[in-house]
Image (cartoon, coloured by chain):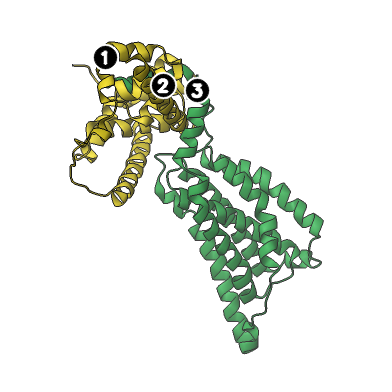
Chain colours: A yellow, B green
Amino acid sequence: MKQQLDDRALTTLMQAAQAGDTQAYVQLLKEIAPRLRQIVRGQRRFLKSEDIEDIVQDVLLSLHAVRATYDRQRPFMPWLIAITRNRLADAARRYTRRAAHEVQVENLPVTFSDEGTNIGSGEYRDPEALSQAIRTLPPGQRDAIEMLKLREMSLKAAAAASGTSVGALKVSIHRAMATLRKVLIKAS
Amino acid sequence: MTMDTEKLIARLAEVVEPVRPLPRPWIRMAAWLLVAIPYVALVVFVVSPRADLISKASEWRYVIEQVAALATGMTAATAAFASVVPGYDRKFLFLPALPLAVWLGSLGEGCVQDWIQLGPNGLSLQPDWFCFPAIVLVGAVPAIAMAVMLRRGAPLTPHITTAIGGLAAAGLGNFGLRLFHSQDASLMVLVWQVGTVFILTTIAAWAGHYLLNWRSIIGIGRGNVLMP
């Protein structure tokens, strides 16, 4: 089993990261990610793993944004824990706000038996045609389909991974879906 | 580690640049004063200092109140800068409590003395609407400098941070005001000047979330860092 680095080693890595050392930064982030996951899971046992991952990523982004606030004379972990606690509290507030606006509904069938609601459903059943149609999409739209539909990433994670905004991704996915629909109907 | 987090780490590492660690809170406070004090001096000079300033400098009550107002501004600034550093002891937030207590205590004691010497006439209250815009004017640049400097930190307690940052700027504003505004009746100072300081502090506290929030800081980070 991999041995965890102690606080002094993390402090050294953080100092190097502040100086712009990429290798040290990767090592530091990879070292702290499992610890963050453990802390978040410990504090929020009821969260699903993707929600835990969202918070871990939020903490990593926060750390990156405020890395200049780390004081080289002070230990690293209390600094990281303070950021983590703050982001956990933010996530709890977000969760409460979302829950307050959520409306519980019964698990209704996804579709109805009426023909009108199922127009065109048969045309999308050919996986080969679908993957060919995806390949013809412009790169931005293709990436959006790949991340959001095929890999089922969250909008936030996909935006972080692709370096675009959530809004731009929404536009890309909407356009991509419209293009695919048109291409597949034409092909059939 | 899931693929997404691994990818995020790779992205962050790709774009990591050297950063200069923020100086200690008290050093940042000194830097803030370097911007704020010349501006306050300029305003006092332009508006023209009060005619009795030299004689006032030998009145212990005036000196105590001015030193306490300045000390409140300085300690509040230090506390505000400490509050944006993760892991800093939250006790720092109470740093301005002592000079603020001295300031309010001196004014309170002045009110009692005025009442003993002049009776109810000593506590008469007239409108002094000049105080609000004057403190806003003197505190404007210190407040802007404070906001810019606070945004370089972590928005851990946005409302508290901007409240004490606002107290720092308004305290300094009141310090400057009393160098050109001849109003020394304790009750008048307490109500109109300290009242203005607390109103500005409350407004600053309200604005905390707009001024300091993770979304804008990470947004800037994403924009600068994650865009290919």
Quadrant housing residue B174: bottom right
Residue pictured at 73% horizontal, 62% vertical? B179
Say left or right for A32 vs A178.
left
Say left or right for A97 vs B157.
left
Provide the residue designation for mark 3. Answer: B227
Instruction: Say few, some or many: other residues with alpha carbon within 10 Å of mark 2 (under 14 / 14 to 19 / 20 or more).
Output: some
The verdict on a common chain for dots 3 and 2 is no
Which chain does the numbered disc 3 sit on? B
| Numbered disc 2: secondary structure | helix
Q: B86 or B158: which is nearer to us?
A: B158
Instruction: Say few, some or many: other residues with alpha carbon within 10 Å of mark 1 (under 14 / 14 to 19 / 20 or more).
Output: few
**Which of the two discs, 3 and 2, sits closer to the camera?**
2
Quarter of the picture containing the N terminus of chain B is top left
**Which of the two discs, 3 and 1, sits closer to the camera?**
1
Provide the residue designation for mark 2. Answer: A179
x then y, percent, for residue A52:
27, 33
Residue pictured at 60% horizontal, 86% vertical? B116
Check the image and report above or below for B88 versus A76: below
Q: A136 or B130: which is nearer to us?
A: A136
Which chain does the numbered disc 2 sit on? A
x then y, percent, for residue A2:
22, 16
Say left or right for B13 vs A107.
right
Provide the residue designation for mark 1. Answer: A127
Is the residue under label 1 in contact with that under label 3 (CB below 8 Å)?
A: no
x then y, percent, for residue A81:
33, 36
Residue pictured at 27% horizontal, 34% vertical? A116
Using the numbered discs, state the Cα–Cα distance from disc 1 to disc 2 in whole angstroms: 16 Å
Quadrant housing residue A90: top left
The number of numbered badges drawn on the structure is 3
Say left or right for B220 vs B178.
left
Using the numbered discs, state the Cα–Cα distance from disc 3 to disc 1 in whole angstroms: 33 Å
